[in-house]
């Protein structure tokens, strides 16, 4: 008996793709991690989370360890509403669902919106976990290129118009990261944001706005799509992973009440009482505005270091986008297969993510790589780029 | 624009059912909670979890708060392998997936095995969350009655034989809780276990064995289906919710490697690093065998109290199953609609779960109710049954 013979049709379809996490390289301990899209150790409030855990379990005893009932947990929604207000969005409790990170939010959205023949539009490149999630539900995609000003809404409009005139199905939604995008670091301009909302209205699709990096603008953060959305077409996904800590798995999704109800139908792992209550207790004591200022200053400095090092150590032919916030710098290395480059870089002591993993069509990403300035410290960043420069010189 | 017009077909199907959690009554604070299927406060190790959190965050700092990398988290699999060994099952790491509670395990199994026309077999009655999960994916069910010896394998065989001879589709799997079942407290006899495994072989289906209560046998715990399974037809689901604490959301699923790989494909909320590392750190210091003995003694005493109180305070016509472990007693109240009874019981100060919620066909459960002896303390249990007895007398 083969267990595969019992698999559902969409599972058989999903298993045709690369295994999840296949982009995660085995990075030796001594390597400088310019691959890691997570916060620098010193910026993760482990001492404060410890204090929160102690306070929580002393004051509420078993409540946060039960299925229901921690008063602290209930406060988390209000903290999240406050975060959204900073991004220009006022939502009621009914328009908000707490999830296990942005990933669960994206997965629930896929479950509720995607049939096996549903067309999903994504940026090219985009967040690899999101690609993996959508590929579990459909194999029909529209990919829209990105330039320095973010998603090319002009090309998107052309694709939509062509499909409409050819009688091809239009996308049910566009998944995008308009602000400090992963992996390109680009930010959609206000003009394109407006254009995108108009396209959604004209071609009747929804927009999933992943705003995980939204608060991390070095100088300021642009207006969210959701706050500009008059027609309730935008589903907003947020996360505390990048601005507090990923390991507590706190994200959320916001949209109209009917959508939130449907998402709740599929959110079947019950409440993460302890993690949610711990996060809420930590946030109760935090001056979040000061905290964000500290993060922004730190990431801006690190980004500046990385950009300066690129200027100094990269061969002439290499180019990159200059981000205004977030975690990432997107680098073009003409004529080099970055997938092959990685093993050499690892052997010399630096890690990055090859561009191919951020594209549905792996061929498209071959000459690109993603550098993260979030995790490594300033000294490591400079050293890492220096090493990468040498590896690339050896190739020329 | 109505967001519902963008919903996937299976979402439209799922939304025809009752909303998830509609069985959760609004229980006033003063009520005795004989409804709650979770551990008594004094048995939840909140002080020890606090110590574990402190030790973990002091020794590993940010690691358990990042996406990856806590050495403690990796130890959790070994603790779970040890629990399974106690249940007679030896598994490798590749045959094991940690999930956010048993619920996520059941949901992942449904995602991987269920198409919209897949037939799923369940016990009648069964765990209401499992019903809710399966109803998100299919509306085709076979229900198999339960008596004091657990699932009626003779009736199940008859159903299967009839379907086969009528050319109707056979179930892809049976979901069951063979040991200290929720809600009936019954345990499948060894003979019926053997019969069930033979049926799986003859009619080519899988068995999902939910063993959440398996270690909580007052005297001993019967052999698991998984340990008797020669043909790899059993998928085993375990949980630490009932024997440590539900709020940390630690469950697991075990099966052949190919199945675990497919489940991993759909487990898209990443690792719950902090919760997993906290649990592992707590378990590192725990003498689990002593802990289980303490739990068993406590629950047995509470169960005895509840059974004695039923003998004393219930009207003649009321009957119940006597459990040998677990959390629940299943009570039959002939001629009474327990759904209607609940509001009266709540107004007098006691809560239970009406039987209807444990059946796909709500009519079947009308004369039943589930009592839990896990959460209330001994004094409350006796008081609660006394109140329930008075409420029932008033009905006669």
Image: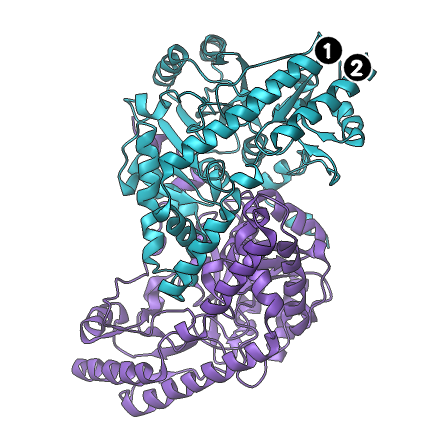
Chain colours: A cyan, B purple
Q: How many numbered discs sit on the rendered protein?
A: 2
Q: Is residue A53 above or below residue A321?
A: below
Q: Is residue B221 above or below residue B120?
A: below
10 Å neighbourhood of mark 1: few (<14), some, or many (≥20)? some
Label 2, label 1: how far apart the Cα atoms are: 7 Å
Quadrant containing the N terminus of chain B is: top left
At x 75%, y 27%, the residue is A342
Chain letter of the residue carrying label 2: A
Element on which disc 1 rests: loop
Residue B373 x, y percent position in the rendering: 39, 78
Tag 1 residue = A315
Residue B303 has which mark?
none
Residue B279 x, y percent position in the rendering: 55, 61
Q: Do marks 2 and 1 share a chain?
A: yes
Tell which of B365 and B305 is nearer to you.
B305
Q: Is residue B132 above or below residue A33?
A: below
Tell which of B117 and B355 is nearer to you.
B355
At x 65%, y 16%, the residue is A310
Residue A6 x, y percent position in the rendering: 64, 50
Quadrant containing the C terminus of chain B is: bottom left
Element on which disc 2 rests: helix
At x 55%, y 58%, the residue is B278
Q: Using residue A136 as the reference point, say whether residue B50 is left or right of it.
A: left
Tag 2 residue = A393
> Between disc 2 and disc 1, whose residue precedes?
1
Chain letter of the residue carrying label 1: A
Q: Can residue B140 be seen in this snapshot?
A: no
Residue contact between numbered discs 2 and 1, judged by CB atoms under 8 Å: yes
């Amino acid at each position: 008996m083969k267990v595969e013979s019992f698999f559902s049709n969409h599972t058989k379809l999903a298993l045709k793709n690369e295994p999840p996490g296949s982009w995660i390289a085995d990075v030796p301990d001594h390597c400088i991690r310019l691959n890691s899209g997570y916060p620098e150790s010193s910026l993760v409030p482990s001492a404060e989370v410890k204090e929160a855990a102690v306070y929580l379990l002393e004051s509420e005893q078993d409540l946060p360890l039960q299925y229901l009932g921690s008063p602290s947990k209930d406060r988390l929604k209000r903290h999240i509403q406050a975060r959204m207000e900073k991004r220009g969005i006022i939502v009621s409790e009914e328009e908000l669902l707490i999830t296990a990170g942005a990933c669960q939010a994206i997965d629930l959205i896929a479950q509720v919106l995607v049939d096996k023949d549903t067309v999903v539009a994504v940026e090219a490149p985009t967040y690899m976990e999101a690609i993996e999630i959508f590929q579990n539900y459909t194999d029909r995609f529209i990919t829209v290129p990105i330039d320095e000003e973010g998603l090319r809404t002009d090309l998107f409009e052309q694709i939509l118009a062509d499909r409409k005139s050819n009688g091809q199905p239009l996308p049910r939604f566009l998944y995008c990261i308009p602000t400090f995008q992963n992996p390109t670091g680009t930010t959609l301009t206000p003009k394109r944001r407006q254009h995108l909302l108009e396209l959604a209205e004209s071609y009747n699709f929804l927009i999933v706005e992943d705003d995980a990096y939204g608060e991390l603008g070095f100088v300021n953060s642009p207006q969210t799509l959701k706050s500009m959305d008059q027609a309730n077409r935008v589903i907003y996904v947020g996360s505390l992973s990048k601005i507090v800590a990923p390991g507590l798995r706190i994200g959320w999704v916001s949209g109209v009440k009917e959508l939130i109800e449907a998402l709740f139908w599929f959110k079947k792992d019950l409440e993460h009482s302890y993690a949610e209550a711990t996060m809420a207790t930590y946030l109760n004591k935090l001056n979040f505005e000061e905290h964000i200022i500290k993060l922004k200053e730190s990431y801006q400095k690190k980004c500046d270091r990385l950009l300066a090092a690129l200027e100094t150590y990269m061969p002439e032919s290499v180019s990159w986008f200059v981000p205004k916030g977030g975690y990432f710098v997107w680098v073009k290395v003409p004529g080099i297969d970055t997938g092959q480059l990685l093993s050499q870089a690892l052997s010399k002591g630096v890690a990055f993510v090859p561009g191919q993993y951020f594209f549905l069509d792996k061929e498209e990403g071959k000459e690109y790589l993603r550098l993260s300035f979030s995790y490594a410290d300033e000294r490591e960043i400079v050293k890492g780029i220096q090493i990468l420069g040498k590896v690339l010189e050896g190739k020329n």
